[in-house]
Amino acid sequence: MTGKQDRSEGSVYDRIYAVVTQVPRGQVSTYGDVARRAGLEGRARQVGYALHALDEGRDVPWQRIVNASGQISRRGEPEPARLQRNLLEAEGIVFDAHGVIDLGRFAWRP
DNA sequence: AAACTGACTAATA
DNA sequence: CTATTAGCCAGTT
């Protein structure tokens, strides 16, 4: 092992994962929103970066995070995007004809 | 240590 | 609608 520092919680990623895990089934959240809840307002990119680096072993519902337009990101890779959509629809999320989620209805608002 | 990268957002044109 | 600009910053090379 490379012996990375093991901050039980100073790690930006762990905080992001913790927030994402709190998103209830059947609801979605945006990168900016997750960043805000993780105490990282204005750092939405870091949220996306964290999810990109996410491991399969984690029980983080990464699929519940979409961009501020209510659309699935990663358009360069349509296949994983399709998987994400599939997972969300299985949870009850509805996409319109343009593949957009109505955030006013499905966005997680605790 | 400096450059590069990137699942983003908002504002502007 | 598309394109551009700017802000943001951890991780990788």
Image (tube, coloured by chain):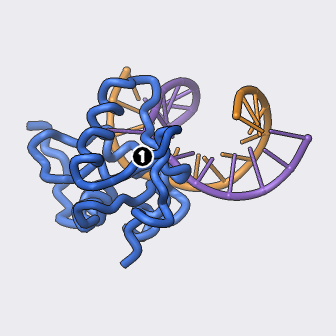
Chain colours: A blue, B purple, C orange
Q: Is residue B2 left or right of residue A91?
A: right
Q: Which residue is at the front of the view, C12 or A106? A: A106
**A26 vs A84: above or below:** below
Q: Is residue A72 left or right of residue C5?
A: left
* Residue A19 position in % (x across, y down): 29, 65
Residue located 44% across and 65% down the image: A105
Q: Which residue is at the front of the view, A32 or A66? A: A66
**B7 vs C3: above or below:** below
> Callout 1: residue from which chain?
A
The residue carrying pointer 1 sits among few (fewer than 14), some (14 to 19) or many (20 or more) residues within 10 Å by Cα, namely some
Amino acid type of the residue that numbered disc 1 sits on in the rendered structure: Phe
**A23 vs B5: above or below:** below
Q: Is residue A1 left or right of residue A5?
A: left
Residue located 16% across and 57% down the image: A6
The quadrant the N terminus of chain A occupies is: top left
For disc 1, the marked residue is A95
| Res. A45 visible in picture | no
The image quarter containing residue C5 is top right
Residue located 48% across and 60% down the image: A103
* Residue A85 position in % (x across, y down): 32, 40
| Res. A56 visible in picture | yes
Q: Secondary structure at mark 1?
A: loop
Q: Which residue is at the front of the view, A110 or A39? A: A110
Residue located 18% across and 46% down the image: A4
